[in-house]
Amino acid sequence: MNMHTQPQRTPAETALIDAFGERLSLLPGDGAVMLKRDDAIEAVKHGLPTRRIESWHYTDLRRLLSAVPDFDPAAAAKAIAPIVDGSTVLTLLNGVSSAKAPVVDGVSVQRLSEKLTDGSIAPGLDPYGSDDAIGALNTAFVADGYFVDIADGAELEKPIELQNLQAGGQTHVRLPVRVGTGAKAVIVERQAGEGAALTSSVSQLVLGEGAEVTWLIVQEQPDTATHLAQFKAHIGKDAKLTLFVMNAGGRLVRQEIMVKTTGEGADFKLRGINLLAGDTHTDVTMVLDHAMPHTTSTEVIRNVVTGKARGVFQGRINVHQYAQKTNAKMACNTLLLSDDGEFSTKPELEIFADDVVCGHGATVTEIDHDHLFYLMARGVDEKSARGLLVKAFVAEVIEELDDETIVEALEARLDEWFVTHG
C-alpha cells in the first residue's frame, strides 16, 4: 500500500487557514459564494505552490511567503491623488469600498460586497485552473471591491482610477469590469500602500464587440508588502485591449495575466515595465489564448534590475486549432545593473493552427559602454549618463501609448522611482 503524507504546513499556510476560520462569519456571501470559499480554502490547505509546479517554477511561493500579517481592522489607509488629473476615482481603503460612488454618464458602479451577498458574483469566483493559488486565496477572503459596467457606445472623457490602498495587515479585493459594445475607456488600476501587508487583487475584464480599452496597472507597494494579483480578460469581436503594467515596488510580487480572444478581429497589446531594486522578487506570468481566427497580439516587456533583486517573466501564447490567421509576437528585454541581480525569462508558444505568424525573443544585457562613453565625452557625468540610458530603455515602451497625458503621468512615476533608487 502506498502512503502519501501531507508535508508539514508552513507558518504562512497555518496562519491563512486559521484566519479563514476566524473571519468566516464576517465574510459576505450567499450559499453559492460560501461553497466557493470552502473550495478555495481547501486548495490552500493542500499547500501553497512550490517550484515543482511548472507555472510556479521560478517563484516558490511556499518558501518565499514565510509569514503573513494578521488582519488589522484599525489600519487606516488614505486616498491619494490620481495619476491623471480629473480622473474618476473609486477607492478601496484596506479592502473596503466607498459607500457613495461618483456618478459618471454611461457607467454604473456597484459595491462588490453587495454582489457577494446576493450571490450574483459567484460564477466569477471559479478558479482559473488547478494551480490557481492567487485565485483561491482571493476567493477565500475577498470581502469587497467594485463592479463597473460601462454601457454600450459610451466613450469616457476621463479615466476611471481604481485605487486599492492598504496601511498594513491583509486586504483581498476584486474588480470585475464589463465594457459594452463599441464603448471606449481608460482604466487605471492603482496598487499601493505602506507597512507590512499581504494583498491579493483580482481584476476581471470583459470587452464587448468593437470596444476599446486601455488598462494601466501601476503597482507601487512598499518593500515590506507581498502583492499577489491577477488580471483576466476576454476580448470580443473586433475589440481592442491595451494593457500596460508597471511594477515599481513590493517585496514579493506575482502579477498574473490571463487573456483570451473570444471573437474574430480581437487585438491585444501588452506593454510592461518591471523596475526591480533591493532584495525583492517580482514575477509577471502571462497566458494568452488565441481561440478565434484573425486575431493579433504583441507583448513587449522591459526590465531594469538593480541590487539583489530577482525578476521573472513567463509568457505563454496558445494558438488554438481553429485560430487560423493569428499574428502573435512577444519580446522580453532586460537591463542588468548589478552583479547580484538576476532575471529569468521563459517565453513559450504552443501552436495547433497551421496558418499563423508567431514569434518570441528575449535578451539580457548591461549598459552599452559605447553609449556611456558618447554621453560622457559630451560633458555628461557618469551617473547622469547612466540614468539617461536606463530611462530611455524603459520610456520607449511608455511612449507607445497614444495619450500624451497618460505618457506624462507614467513618466512622472518613472522619475520618482529613479530618484529613490538612483
Image: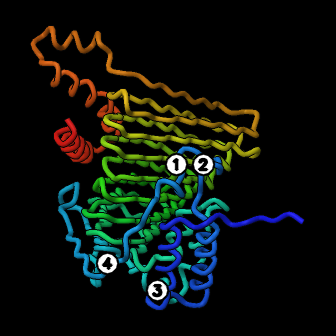
Relative side of 409 to 95, left or right: left
Distance Cα–Cα, label 4 vs label 2: 31 Å
Q: Look at the image and tell me in which quarter the N terminus lies.
A: bottom right
Where in the figure is residue 394, as x and y percent of width and height? 32, 33
Distance Cα–Cα, label 2 vs label 1: 6 Å
Mark 3: few, some, or many residues within 10 Å (few <14, many ≥20)?
few
Task: Name the image quarter holding residue 111.
Answer: bottom left
In the image, residue 59 above or below residue 174 = above
Disc on the earlier residue, 2 or 1: 2
Q: At 46% from the left edge and 59% from the top edge, which residue is drawn?
A: 65
Relative side of 354 to 208, left or right: right
The mark found on residue 200 in the picture is none
Disc on the earlier residue, 3 or 4: 3
Q: Are marks 2 and 1 in contact (CB under 8 Å)?
A: yes
Q: Which residue is mark 4?
A: 72
Q: Which residue is mark 3?
A: 22
Q: Which residue is mark 1?
A: 59
Task: Name the image quarter holding residue 79.
Answer: bottom left
Q: Look at the image and tell me in which quarter the C terminus lies.
A: top left
Q: At 26% from the left edge and 62% from the top edge, which residue is drawn?
A: 193
Disc on the earlier residue, 3 or 2: 3
Of the residues shown, which amino acid type is indicated by label 4?
Asp
Mark 4: few, some, or many residues within 10 Å (few <14, many ≥20)?
some
Of the residues shown, which amino acid type is indicated by label 3?
Glu
Q: Are marks 3 and 4 in contact (CB under 8 Å)?
A: no
